[in-house]
Amino acid sequence: MSTELQRKATQIGVWSAIAGGAVGFALGMIFAPKRGPDARRRIAYQIQRAAKEAGDAVRRYAGSSTVSEARKNRDAMVADAQAQADHIRDDIDALLEELRKQSSTSRSSSDTE
């Protein structure tokens, strides 16, 4: 079976499971011993949450096989920014160490006077 057919079969299976779960959940909520408005509110909330999670899962699945040019650029920019931040941090640490040495030297010379 080709990769494309496997991916389509997986997508159909995922959407079928999500749709079946949503229908089953909705029917369960409808026949649950709750007032109508409460049940509808709970159904709406659960459907929104399930749709968001399903969308996130599909995006992760679809995005895992290909790396877009934007993602490559983003990763390169983040790595560059981290390198620059590390360099700046090292420079600041070196300057602070120099200031500490100068401060301790100036205190030592003032104590001997």
Image (tube, rainbow, N blue to C red):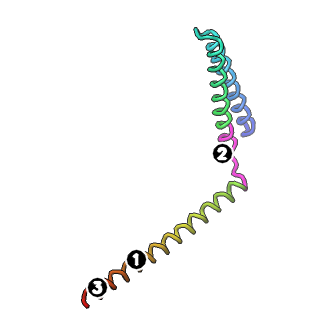
Rendered location of residue 42, percent (x, y): 62, 20
Residue 97, numbered circle? 1
Residue 18, numbered circle? none
8 is higher (above) or lower (below) than 66: above
Circle 1 or circle 2, nearest the eye: 1
55 is higher (above) or lower (below) than 32: below
Label 3 secondary element: helix
Along the line of sight, the residue nearer the viewer: 71 or 107: 107
The amino acid type found where label 2 is placed reads Ser
User: How crowded is the residue under tag 2: few (<14 C-alpha within 10 Å), some, or many (20+)?
Assistant: few
Rendered location of residue 97, percent (x, y): 40, 76
User: How crowded is the residue under tag 3: few (<14 C-alpha within 10 Å), some, or many (20+)?
Assistant: few
- Furthest-left residue in this view: 112
**Count of marks placed on residues:** 3
Range of residues picked out in magenta = 58-69
Question: Mark 3 or mark 1, which is nearer the start of the sequence?
Answer: 1
Label 1 secondary element: helix
Along the line of sight, the residue nearer the viewer: 98 or 54: 98
- Furthest-bottom residue in this view: 113
Label 2 secondary element: helix
Reply yes or no: does residue 10 show up in magenta: no
Cα–Cα span, label 1 and label 2: 46 Å
